[in-house]
Image (tube, helix red, strand yellow):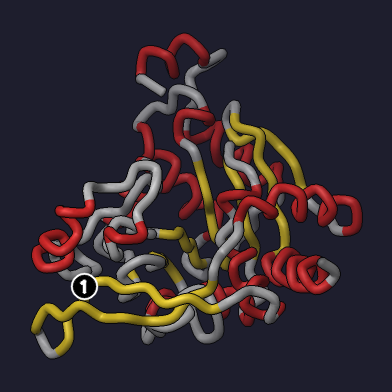
């Protein structure tokens, strides 16, 4: 959405004070470990843009809280697997040979939004080292959450998602639906119901660029909105508008565990 469209669709100017009040109203509290998935344009016209949203989140969470966001870079991957759009077959070998290796402090995200891109600029934010499904974290235990991100099964055991699960964290969806809820991929792993596939990305090993093959699941987020609807029938989900964005706050272990149980019934 263009800035002009955001202005036209905004009922009021959204300030940091408004965002803080909305975050508290939905149930965000000091000391939480919070994963945020967001759409800046859905919030409305924010004074200060993405930076203001991040400042509001940090202020509400406080120095004993942790703010986590997905910083995925799906384009750092095997171009032979790309679809919508795909690339000409004659480009694939050259892309594999020349694509830069993933570097947490240099590689941009891929279609993750302005809030995420702004979040990564903060000196106090640490980004995990995974070429496709990295996460960034600020605040308490951010080093523990992001360190030693396994290359194989990057959304499974001992990943940032799993560490948030062990910390009994929460998920906040701001203007996005369950299809953006990365924690549900952890549920896919724990369910044991999905097939394993091989993929590849350029990474750095001992300072050298290498084309590395690794394992992940054949993820299927198309089911996530249906799972989310069923989840809300049986679990507590707080709903409120953050600015103008319809938003949902939920327990991360609850949505992960529900995803596990749901997938096992299919």
Q: Which residue is drawn at 33% across and 58% down?
A: 73
Q: In this view, does 60 lie to the left or right of 100?
A: right
Q: Where is residue 111 in the image (x, y as percent from the top left)?
A: 37, 45
Q: Which residue is drawn at 60% across and 59% down?
A: 220
Residue nearest the observer in this picture, 66 or 235:
235
Relative to 183, residue 233 above or below:
above
Q: Residue at x 25, y 47 (%)?
A: 87
Q: Position of residue 65 (x, y in %)?
A: 53, 67
| Residue sticking out furthest to the bottom | 206
Q: How many labels does the image show?
A: 1
Relative to 25, residue 67 above or below:
below
Q: Position of residue 112 (x, y in %)?
A: 40, 48
**Which residue carries the number 1 mark?**
202
On the question of residue 126 being in view, the answer is: no
Q: Is residue 3 left or right of residue 251?
A: left
SS of the residue at dot 1?
strand
Q: In which quarter of the image is residue 130?
A: bottom left
Relative to 253, residue 242 above or below:
above
| Residue sticking out furthest to the right | 234
Q: Which residue is drawn at 46% across and 9% down?
A: 8
Quadrant holding the C terminus: bottom right
Residue nearest the observer in this picture, 158 or 49:
158
Quadrant holding the N terminus: top left
On the question of residue 215 being in view, the answer is: yes
**Is disc 1 surrounded by few (<14), some (14 to 19) or many (20+) residues within 10 Å?**
many
| Residue sticking out furthest to the front | 90
Q: Position of residue 116 (x, y in %)?
A: 38, 50
Q: In this view, does 60 lie to the left or right of 122?
A: right
């Amino acid at each position: 959405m263009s800035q002009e469209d955001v202005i036209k669709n905004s009922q009021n100017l959204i300030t940091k004070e408004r965002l803080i009040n909305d975050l508290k109203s939905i149930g965000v509290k000091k000391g939480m470990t919070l994963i945020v998935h967001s759409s800046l344009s859905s919030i409305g016209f924010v004074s200060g843009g993405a930076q203001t949203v991040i400042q509001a989140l940090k202020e509400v969470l406080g120095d004993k809280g942790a703010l986590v966001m997905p910083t995925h870079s799906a384009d750092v991957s095997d171009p032979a697997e790309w679809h919508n759009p795909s690339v000409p077959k004659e480009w694939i070998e050259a892309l594999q040979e020349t694509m830069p290796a993933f570097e947490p402090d240099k590689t941009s995200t891929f279609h993750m939004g302005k809030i995420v891109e702004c979040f990564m600029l903060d000196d106090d934010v640490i980004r995990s080292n995974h070429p496709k499904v990295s996460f960034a974290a600020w605040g308490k235990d951010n080093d523990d959450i992001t360190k030693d991100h396994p290359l194989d099964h990057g959304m499974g055991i001992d990943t940032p998602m799993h560490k948030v699960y062990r910390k009994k964290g929460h998920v906040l969806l701001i203007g996005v639906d369950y299809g953006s809820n990365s924690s549900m991929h952890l549920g896919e792993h724990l369910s044991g119901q999905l097939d394993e596939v091989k993929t590849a990305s350029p990474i750095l090993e001992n300072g050298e660029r290498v084309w590395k093959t690794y394992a992940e699941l054949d993820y299927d987020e198309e089911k996530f909105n249906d799972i989310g609807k069923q989840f809300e029938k049986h679990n507590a989900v707080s709903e409120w508008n953050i600015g103008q964005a319809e938003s949902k706050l939920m327990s991360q272990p609850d949505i992960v565990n529900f995803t596990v149980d749901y997938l096992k019934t299919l």
